[in-house]
């Protein structure tokens, strides 16, 4: 088992390894005291891992569970009210522990519930998708969606620990696994050339554990320097500006987030090669790795449409677009461009 320290304002550990869910109670024994446990999960993960998790707790604990329907729609206000009410009806207090068992959807929803109910109850993340293990469960961002947009309501609230049981990844569909690979490749591109090289061997379980551990360490390093997302954390958005435009152009239906990020990473790198800011051939290396991981690689969105969509992105401040570009594989920087410079960058 690997352990990564996340040294934010309220430090915690991330555990990565096999057969961890069945040992959950032992693993958090020295981390926190709690009376009752409330597990929040979705209907798919419930059938796969809920019983194992429940059995890991001592018999004198009351274990409650609340199951939402799987999918992005679960991050909604209706579920907030339903779960807050469930907690109140079962007399859950700040002496109890809330556990998120599932992918990023369950993690984001549970984190927001835990940060708001009684102004904050301890919570544990047990992420069960590749994306949630390498990305969403670490860093303390919680959120729900409202009709006006994704992740518009949320909080920064760190878990007491994160338990990444890599055995859970064996039940993921190929599509959901490769969706997470978009973010894995991103970490290699922005931070670690050796990680980038290692990714081609991900089918080996030992390598998989190594890769997940390294991705989490990178996320932890970045988050520790910018817990509240005011600067450096932006580098984690490599490929996301164009990726988001691709998702939007396709009405959030044709591509998953990770697929769109793959397209975004390749396209932005191609553009920055033309702009002479990235060595020629870098985008081809990313493309080859994305192809190996069954991710799409071609951007079918015209550059003028990309310009329009990127310029209205809620992340832009004072008409400045922050692009994350590569100096090389494993090294990135933030390039600020005003609208006219961004037009030049897009060759418009
Ligand atoms: N908080 C953050 O920092 C952060 C970062 C990135 C993404 N996110 C959020 O994460 C969410 C996406 O997360 P996701 O990709 O994990 O999606 P998800 O939670 O919807 O999971 C994808 C699907 O996989 C199923 N599933 C989960 N674990 C499984 C397993 N072990 N075996 C079989 N099926 C399993 C789920 O039931 C679901 O149908 C988005 O809402 C996004 O906004 C948050």
Image: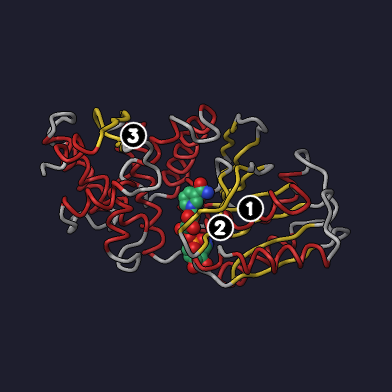
Closer to the camera in the image, 127 or 49: 127
User: Which percent across, then down, holds residue 166?
Assistant: 52, 52
Quadrant housing the N terminus: top right
Q: Is 142 displayed left or right of 32 in the figure? A: left
Q: Is 33 displayed left or right of 156 in the figure? A: right
Secondary structure beneath label 1: helix
Answer above or below: position of 233 versus 19.
above
Q: Quadrant of residue 88?
A: bottom right
Secondary structure beneath label 3: helix
Residue behind mark 3? 190
Rounded to the nearest angstrom, the CA distance separating label 1 from label 3 is: 29 Å
Rounded to the nearest angstrom, the CA distance separating label 2 from label 1 is: 7 Å
User: Which percent across, then down, holds residue 144?
Assistant: 56, 58
Q: Is mark 2 within 8 Å of ligand 1?
A: no
Q: Residue furthest right?
A: 60
Rounded to the nearest angstrom, the CA distance separating label 2 from label 3 is: 28 Å
Residue behind mark 2? 144
Circle 1 crowding by C-alpha within 10 Å: few under 14, some 14–19, many from 20: many
For the point 56% across and 53% down, the residue is 153
Q: Residue furthest front?
A: 318
Q: Quadrant of residue 141?
A: top right
- Counting residues from the start of the chain, the first of labels 1 and 3 encountered is 1
Tell me if I can see residue 137 in this picture.
yes
Dots 1 and 3: beta carbons under 8 Å? no
Residue behind mark 1? 112
């Amino acid at each position: 088992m690997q352990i990564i320290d996340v040294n934010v304002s309220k430090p915690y550990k991330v555990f990565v390894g096999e057969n961890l869910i069945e040992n959950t109670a032992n693993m958090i024994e020295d981390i926190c005291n709690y009376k009752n446990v409330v597990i929040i999960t979705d209907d798919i993960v419930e059938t796969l891992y809920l019983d194992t998790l429940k059995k890991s707790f001592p018999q004198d604990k009351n274990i409650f569970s609340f199951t939402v329907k799987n999918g992005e729609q679960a991050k909604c206000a209706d579920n907030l009210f339903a779960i807050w009410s469930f907690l109140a009806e079962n007399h859950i207090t700040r002496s109890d522990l809330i556990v998120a068992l599932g992918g990023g959807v369950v993690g984001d929803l549970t984190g927001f519930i835990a940060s708001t109910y009684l102004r904050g109850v301890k919570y544990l993340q047990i992420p069960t998708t590749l994306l949630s293990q390498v990305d969403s469960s670490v860093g303390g961002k919680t959120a729900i969606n409202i009709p006006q947009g994704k992740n518009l309501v949320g909080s920064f609230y760190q878990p007491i620990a994160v338990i990444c049981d890599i055995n859970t990844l064996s039940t993921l569909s190929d599509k959901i696994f490769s969706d997470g690979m978009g973010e894995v490749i991103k970490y290699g591109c922005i931070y670690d050339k050796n990680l980038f090289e290692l990714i081609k061997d991900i089918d080996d379980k030992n390598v998989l554990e190594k890769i997940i551990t390294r991705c989490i360490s990178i996320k932890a390093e970045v988050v520790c320097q910018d817990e509240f997302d005011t600067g450096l954390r932006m580098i984690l958005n490599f490929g996301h500006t164009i990726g988001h435009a691709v998702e939007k152009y396709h009405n959030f239906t044709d591509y998953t987030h990770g697929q769109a990020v793959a397209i975004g990473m390749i396209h932005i790198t191609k553009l920055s090669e033309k702009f002479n800011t990235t060595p020629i051939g870098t985008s081809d290396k990313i493309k080859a790795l994305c192809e190996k991981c069954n991710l799409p690689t071609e951007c079918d969105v015209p550059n003028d449409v990309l310009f329009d969509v990127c310029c209205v992105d809620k992340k832009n401040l004072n008409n400045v677009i922050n692009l994350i570009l590569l100096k090389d594989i494993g090294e990135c920087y933030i390039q600020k461009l005003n609208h006219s410079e961004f037009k030049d960058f897009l060759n418009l």
